[in-house]
Amino acid sequence: MLFQVRMDVEIPTDLPEDVAADIKAREKAYSQELQRSGKWRHIWRVAGEYANYSIFDVDSNEELHGLLTGLPLFPYMRIAVTPLCRHPSSIRDDDR
Ligand SMILES: O=C(O)C[C@H]1C=CC(=O)O1
């Protein structure tokens, strides 16, 4: 199951810099591990914003929920999820 996910990050300005740096480092490792696993298929920065558009490929809504709530930055994010399905004109075999 494919989902487009938009993540907007809002780290409080009063969060100590070292704490924020640690969370971002753990977020990067978590994200890259999921990308290597194929669960997090794409990630794109929204130009000019601390936000991304991502594509997740998961087995269920529950799995997506678990992955998103496990993000180290989750407490500081607004997340919007859009379910996707194959477009009849797609020429890509892996769009499912
Ligand atoms: O930078 C972001 O968009 C937030 C988050 C998503 C992956 C990651 O490494 O950080």
Image (cartoon, grey):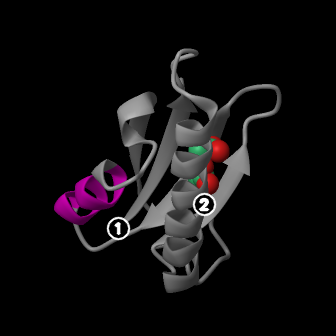
The label nearer to you, 2 versus 1, is 2
> Residue 11 at what x, y percent from top left?
53, 25
Query: In the figure, 53 relative to 42: above or below?
Result: above
Question: Looking at the image, which residue is at 82% across and 26% down?
Answer: 48
Give the side of residue 66 with respect to residue 51, left or right.
Answer: left
Question: Looking at the image, which residue is at 62% across and 45% down?
Answer: 21
> Residue 18 at what x, y percent from top left?
60, 40
Q: Give the spatial CA distance, label 2 vs label 1.
A: 23 Å
For label 1, count other residues whose C-alpha is less than 10 Å away and answer few (under 14), some (14-19) or many (20+).
some
Question: Which quarter of the picture shows residue 78?
Answer: top left
Query: In the figure, 9 relative to 1: above or below?
Result: above
Find numbered disc 2 in the image and state the secondary structure of the residue it sits on: helix
Name the residue furthest right. 48
In the rendered image, which quarter contains the C terminus? Answer: bottom left
| Residue 10 seen | yes
- Magenta-span inclusion, residue 64: yes
Which residue type carries mark 1? Met
Please name the residue that numbered disc 1 is placed on.
1
Query: In the figure, 39 relative to 4: above or below?
Result: below
User: Where does the magenta region start and end?
Assistant: 61-68
Find numbered disc 1 in the image and state the secondary structure of the residue it sits on: loop
Name the residue furthest top. 13
Magenta region, mostly helix, strand or loop? helix
Question: Looking at the image, which residue is at 71% across and 50% down?
Answer: 44
Give the side of residue 54 with respect to residue 44, left or right.
Answer: left
Please name the residue that numbered disc 2 is placed on.
28
